[in-house]
Image (tube, rainbow, N blue to C red):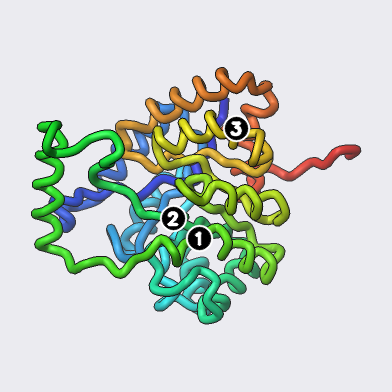
């Protein structure tokens, strides 16, 4: 079984952000390979982690596994900037935490150049997670959560407040982009994210160049089953696998999806599409084959 993971973040020590990232990337390569990942989009640069140059230098050791994907701020990276990233070796883009709506007119030059260069674009959808999930825990009743809360408070003292809003990262913005750039390959993360599933499914239903990844953790996975999102609201060909988790959780993440596919009684062909072929077609590693060919 081949696995294409469209959502792997460049590893970072958040408590020691200036630590050398090379050993962590070495370990990510080993862990992801051992977990069965065949290809992975390595989300690199931008506001977090190493610079684009350093990230590409380190990733170049492992191009048999990693596809370098640049995390960009469209306030700073325009069409010329996208071209420079492509020339450096990046083959996709990732956006998150933008200052304006994803479909703001000033962001269009970056998408236009990405379309010209056949660089797929992964968009975070909805509320940005991380830290404590208060739907399942709370520091008042969980010692581990209390420790995590204290670490988060210490990090907040070192970092300025974030200017982010889930309203700027809606699946409906992808409809604008997909219509404007019909050859741009667009991936929305997290099935649109909690609260956005219907909007995301509607965009995927009608825009041929839009897919959604299934990352986001156990809550989104539970919703995917309970609300019949996989192969129901979202056609199988419109979904891709993404882990978006700590490196030590990748194998567990894969195992959970194996159980989900068993529960949904998916065929071997459907599983192969979700694990590999859909993502591989987006990134040009497989050629689409249509009925009757």
User: How far across and how far down the image is residue 164, in percent?
Assistant: 34, 66
**Residue 91 in sight in this render:** no
User: How far across and how far down the image is residue 283, in percent?
Assistant: 61, 50
Question: Left or right: where does residue 279 sit relative to residue 6?
Answer: right
Secondary structure at badge 1 equals: loop
Q: Mark 2 points at which residue?
A: 126
Q: Residue at x 30, y 41 (%)?
A: 26
Q: Mark 3 points at which residue?
A: 228
Q: Which mark is residue 208?
A: none
Q: Residue at x 69, y 26 (%)?
A: 269
User: How far across and how far down the image is residue 109, in percent?
Assistant: 56, 78
Nearer to us in this view, 105 or 227: 227
**Residue 30 in sight in this render:** yes
Q: Which residue is drawn at 64% across and 41% down?
A: 234
Question: Left or right: where does residue 68 sit relative to residue 46?
Answer: right
Q: In this view, does 141 lie above or below 157?
A: above
Q: Earlier in the sequence, mark 3 or mark 2?
A: 2
**Disc 3 packing (10 Å; few <14; some 14–19; many ≥20):** few
Q: Which of marks 1 and 3 is nearer the N terminus?
A: 1
Q: Mark 1 points at which residue?
A: 170
Q: In this view, does 223 lie above or below 288?
A: above
């Amino acid at each position: 079984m081949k696995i294409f993971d469209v959502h792997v973040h460049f590893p970072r020590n958040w408590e020691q952000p200036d630590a050398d990232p090379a050993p962590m990337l070495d370990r990510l390569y080993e862990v992801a390979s051992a977990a069965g990942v065949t290809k992975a989009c390595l989300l690199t640069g931008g506001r977090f982690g190493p610079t684009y140059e350093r990230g590409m230098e380190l990733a170049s050791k492992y191009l048999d596994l990693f596809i370098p994907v640049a995390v960009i701020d469209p306030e700073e990276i325009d069409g010329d900037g996208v071209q420079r990233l492509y020339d450096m070796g990046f083959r996709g883009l990732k956006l998150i935490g933008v200052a304006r709506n994803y479909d703001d007119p000033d962001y269009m030059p970056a998408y236009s150049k990405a379309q010209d260069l056949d660089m797929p674009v992964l968009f975070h959808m909805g509320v940005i997670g991380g830290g404590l999930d208060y739907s399942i825990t709370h520091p008042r009743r969980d010692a581990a959560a209390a420790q995590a809360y204290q670490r988060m408070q210490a990090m907040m003292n070192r970092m300025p407040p974030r200017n982010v809003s889930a309203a700027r990262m809606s699946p409906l913005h992808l409809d604008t982009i997909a219509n404007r750039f019909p050859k741009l390959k667009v991936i929305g993360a997290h099935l649109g994210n909690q609260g956005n599933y219907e909007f995301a499914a509607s965009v995927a239903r009608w825009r041929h160049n839009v897919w959604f990844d299934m990352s986001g953790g156990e809550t989104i996975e539970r919703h995917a089953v309970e609300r019949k999102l996989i192969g129901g609201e979202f056609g199988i060909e419109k979904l891709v696998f993404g882990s978006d988790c700590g490196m030590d959780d990748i194998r567990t993440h894969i195992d959970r999806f194996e159980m989900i596919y068993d529960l949904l009684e998916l065929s071997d062909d459907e599983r192969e599409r979700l694990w590999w072929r859909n993502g591989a077609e987006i990134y040009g590693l497989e050629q689409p084959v249509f009925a009757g060919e």
